[in-house]
Amino acid sequence: MEKYLGKKYKLKTSENFEEYLKFIDVGLLSRKLVTALSPVSVLTKNDDGSYSLTMTTPIRKVVITFKLGEEFDEDRPDGVKVKSIMRVDGDALIQTQIEENGRKSTHVREFSDKLLTVTTTAEGWDGKCIRIYELVN
C-alpha cells in the first residue's frame, strides 16, 4: 500500500452504483446527487500508524480514518452508522461494512500506478458495483 499513499485518483466510470445505493436504502434525491459527482480519492498514512481514506467532491469531503485489522465506527455519507474493518491483500484495500440490521457490504479497492478500481458487493444483492478512478497529477 505504501507506494500508493498520497496519490490522487478521480472517478471516471461507474457501473451499478445507483443500484447498490438503492439496495442499501439511500433515498432517491441523495442517490441522484451522489451519482452525479466525480470524487477524488486519496489514501494517506498518519503519524500514529493509522490511515485516512479521503473522498473529496465539490460539495463535500468525507474522511475515514482507520487502523488495519481493527474494527471502527463509521458514519456513511448517507448518515447510517456502520461497523467497518479494513485489511490489505497485496495491492487491495478491503473494507467490510456491517449495518445495525446485519447487512454486510464489501468494498475492494485495488490500487495500481494508473487506476484505482473499487468493486462493491453486498449480501442479499446479486449485483456488483464497479467504479474506476484514474490517477490525476
Image (tube, rainbow, N blue to C red):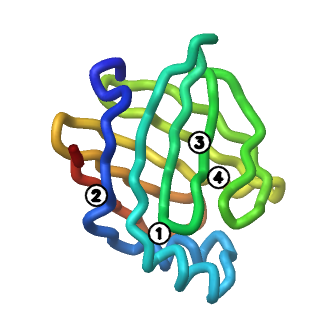
What type is the residue that disc 1 sits on? Asp
- The answer to whether mark 2 and mark 1 are in CB contact below 8 A is no
Query: Front-most of 113 and 90?
Result: 113
Label whose residue precedes the other's in the sequence (2 or 1)? 1
Label whose residue precedes the other's in the sequence (4 or 3)? 3
In terms of secondary structure, where does tag 1 sit? strand
Q: Which mark is residue 52?
A: none
Q: Position of residue 136 (x, y in %)?
A: 23, 48
Q: How far is mark 4 from mark 3, CA to CA?
A: 7 Å
Q: Residue at x 66, y 60 (%)?
A: 77
Q: Which residue is mark 1?
A: 126
Q: Position of residue 110 (x, y in %)?
A: 31, 40
Q: Which residue is mark 2?
A: 132
What type is the residue that disc 3 sits on? Thr
The answer to whether residue 75 is left or right of residue 115 is right
Q: Which residue is mark 3?
A: 96
